Image (cartoon, rainbow, N blue to C red):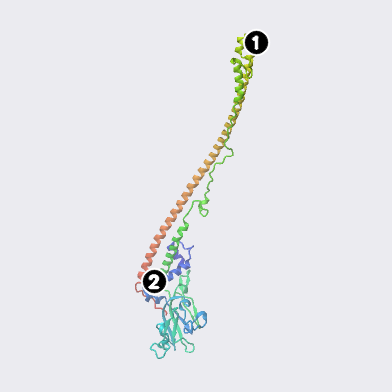
Amino acid sequence: MAFGSKIASLTNSSDSEDLSYAIKKGVDFVISTVASQNPELLKAFSAMYTMGYQSTAIGDKNGTDKTDELGYDWMQKLQAHHLLEVQRGYDGKTYHCRLVSEKLARQMQDPKSIYYSLDNEPSYYLTAQNKVVIYPDVSQALSAQGHLIVVPHSGGRTIDESNEKINLPNLTISNVTNKFEDHDAFPVLFHELVLLHAAEHILIERLADFRTKLPTDLDSDTTMFDKISDISAQISLDTSLPSFTSPTFPTNDVNDALTKAQNMIDGTTMDGDTENESVQYWLADEDEDMVQVTLGTAAQELSRANAILGDFNAELSHNVQTFQQGLAKMGTELSEEQAKTGAKLQEYQTNLAKKMQLYNTLIQKLSTDYGWTQQQLQMINGKKQEFIATNIAMSVDLPESKV
């Protein structure tokens, strides 16, 4: 079973995650845990790199000799964080180099000093940049080679995810090619802790992603809620509210006719006249003909007043009818628009209910996934602690290192 399949069994899926990065995080976690809880166990993760005739006394910057940059940059060249031992080969034998302070660098080269380095008693120190300087220096003329035993971090290893291998790549230094076999410097036993930490890393990343999966708006263009149509609920009428125009009442004309008719019946004189002309006058004069003529004239004036009032009433009735027709037309259109808007509102309410249901479904699923992820993290953390207590904190019998 590949690393990815095992991690997927812990995380439910690993398709969308950076699996290689997660495994590298697991490798570094294992090494740092061993270094902090059982440093002696680092030997099982170490590898010896033979430097050949690579001088450490004249520097190695950019592959050129720089006397102002002493030392071999083992952290950068070997992709390692832990330097366990420095050795120097001479005359067919390998000697352990003792570590001295950089302050004693001159004494290491002084034959009169007790710190003087010999071929069979070599020494080394670390520069301020943490580079290694070996004395006596390695030399092809003396057939003297340097050896560094380090613990490479994930950057100095290759991950073969499908074949479940964490290996060291071959590396050429000076005139020597350092070759490694499968599983060198990383016991298979610790693959389990690597995968547990990788799975934990993926789940923690997934927890951070939950926030981006939350729907933030029921109408956002970036969410799936727009697949459910919205509504523009607005009443729009083509007909405007009609205005009522009242005709002007013909007061002067009506009053003129009525006044003349009244004066002809019981008045003393007509307008502008000084003679008595009323019906009462002619009755008193016993002039029947003038009575009839005056009554006829008064009737004509009354008929004229009535005709004026009739015209006014006709115009008023017409205006009222026109206003009522406008109101009726507007009422009909308003009813139609209300019916249309009501249907749209009903559709909107239905769609809103669908959106709310979808929203609640998403939240419920996210809550379930979030809860499961937290529980899985607790379970994985428990297994990690159990593994550490059993295989790191306690003494573990491992195959002898090839170093």
Quarter of the image that includes the C terminus: bottom left
Residue 289's mark? 1
Instruction: Provide the secondary structure element on which disc 1 rests.
Output: helix
Q: List the single residue furthest toward the bottom.
A: 112
Q: Earlier in the sequence, mark 1 or mark 2?
A: 2
Q: Which mark is residue 145?
A: none
Is the Cβ of the residue at disc 1 closer than 8 Å to that at disc 2?
no
Q: Is residue 1 visible?
A: no
User: What is the crowding at mark 1: few (fewer than 14 residues within 10 Å), some, or many (at least 20)?
Assistant: few
Q: Amino acid at mark 2?
A: Thr
Residue 393 in percent (x, y) is at 35, 72
Residue 224 in the figure: left or right of residue 34? right
Residue for point 49% across, 47% down: 352
Q: Secondary structure at mark 2?
A: helix
Q: Residue beneath label 2, please?
A: 33
**Where the N terminus falls, by quadrant?**
bottom left
* Mark 1 → mark 2, Cα distance in angstroms: 143 Å
Q: Position of residue 40 (x, y in %)?
A: 37, 76
Q: Nearer the viewer, residue 58 or 354?
A: 58
Q: Quadrant of residue 257?
A: top right
